């Protein structure tokens, strides 16, 4: 994703090694480290901070009310208390909202379309991610209208994965909906292996999961978010104030279906779903 961001920024005249320097910090999926990393960047007197994920945006916002912050990926920034409004962010934060919480209800609907007789869905989430409470509310609302029961499974560390899947098996969950979090992304292979071993149809937020063997993904086109985040950075570096730049929402969403995984699970994907797919992996 950074390459996309870097290339777009170059189009605005900002070239690494010539007139811009990048400082990278990553929490390795451990959200509790984000606050200290944000403060570390501030000690370097950076001109702009770019965040990926709601926990990172919240940590950066908590660390500074002065340094401009551009969110490349953030879900429900108003609900998470990061900005006061989308049209008028009102502070030092602006960027792109990825609508991930709002898309969670659609993911539940897709599972219902491809898994016959689905009556119970496990939702894996993580305490400490402020976006997940909004996503769970969206899922509960969608579940009520479809008659599906939701089993919310809170996973705070990779060491809890095995127990989480065991609880899904005991509860007879018929499918899994994984909420977006950097820890889940970092341990993508382990999670995909667990869904396969438990023969659990699952839907994810990022196409990387479907490309790596997950059944389905439905979410934002993330390269597009990073391109647009670079545009915000360029505008801020040229003098614009984040408070004057409305937060944008994505316009590109993609549904990816892995047919090899569907066959392994004994699922027949309805033609109505296949026709809506942006990519079918076979």
Image (cartoon, helix red, strand yellow):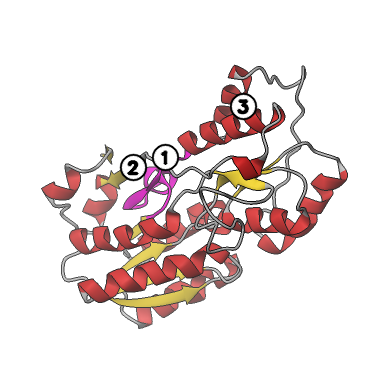
**Residue 71: in sight, yes or no?**
no
Q: Write the residue at 13% across / 48% down.
A: 272
Q: Earlier in the sequence, mark 1 or mark 2?
A: 1
Nearest to the observer: residue 261 or residue 210: 210
Instruction: Residue under label 2, please give it.
Output: 254
Q: Count residues near mark 3 (Cα–Cα under 10 Å), then give few for <14, some for 14-19, many for 20+.
A: some
Q: Secondary structure at mark 1?
A: loop
Q: Check the picture and name the quadrant holding the C terminus.
A: top left
Question: Marks 1 and 2, how far apart in space?
Answer: 6 Å
Quadrant in the rendering for residue 34: bottom right
Task: Categorize mark 1 by other alpha carbons within 10 Å: few (<14), some (14-19), many (20+).
Answer: some
| Residue 70 among those drawn in magenta | no
Disc 3/disc 2 C-alpha distance (Å): 23 Å
User: Could you tell me if the residues under marks 3 and 1 are in contact, i.e. CB atoms within 8 Å?
Assistant: no
Q: 61 and 133: which one is in front?
A: 61
Camera sees residue 206: yes
In this orientation, which residue lies closer to the viewer: 189 or 73? 73
| Mark sitting on residue 6 | 3
Magenta range: 204-222
Looking at the rendered image, the quarter that the N terminus falls into is top right
| Label 2 CA crowd tier, 10 Å (few <14, some 14–19, many 20+) | some
Residue 216 percent location from the top left of the image: 32, 51
Q: Are marks 3 and 2 in contact (CB under 8 Å)?
A: no
Which residue position is annotated with label 1? 221
Identify the residue shown where x is 43% and y is 59%. Answer: 101
Query: Label 3 to label 1, Cα distance in Å?
Result: 17 Å
């Amino acid at each position: 994703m950074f390459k996309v961001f870097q290339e777009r920024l170059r189009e605005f005249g900002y070239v690494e090694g010539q007139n811009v320097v990048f400082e990278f910090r990553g929490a390795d999926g451990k959200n509790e480290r984000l606050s200290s990393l944000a403060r570390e960047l501030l000690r370097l007197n950076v001109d702009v901070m770019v965040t990926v994920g709601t926990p990172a945006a919240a940590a950066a916002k908590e660390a500074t009310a002065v340094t401009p912050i551009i969110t490349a990926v953030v879900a429900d920034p108003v609900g998470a208390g990061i900005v006061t409004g989308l049209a008028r962010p009102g502070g030092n934060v602006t960027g792109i909202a990825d609508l991930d919480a709002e898309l969670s209800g659609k993911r539940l609907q897709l599972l219902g379309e491809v898994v016959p007789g689905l009556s119970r869905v496990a939702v894996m989430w993580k305490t400490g991610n402020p976006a997940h409470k909004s996503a769970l509310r969206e899922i509960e609302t969608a579940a009520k209208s479809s008659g599906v029961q939701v089993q919310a499974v809170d996973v705070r560390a990779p060491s809890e994965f095995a127990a989480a899947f065991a609880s899904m098996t005991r509860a007879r969950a018929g499918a899994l909906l994984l909420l977006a979090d950097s820890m889940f992304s970092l341990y993508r292979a382990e999670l995909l292996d667990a869904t396969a071993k438990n023969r659990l149809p699952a839907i994810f937020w990022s196409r990387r999961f479907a490309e790596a063997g997950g059944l389905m993904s439905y979410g934002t086109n993330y390269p597009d978010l990073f391109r647009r985040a670079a545009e915000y950075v360029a505008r801020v570096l040229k003098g614009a104030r984040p408070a004057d730049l409305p937060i944008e929402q994505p316009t590109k969403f993609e549904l990816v279906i892995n047919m090899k995984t569907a066959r392994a699970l004994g699922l027949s994907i309805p033609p109505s779903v296949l026709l809506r797919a942006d990519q079918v992996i076979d």
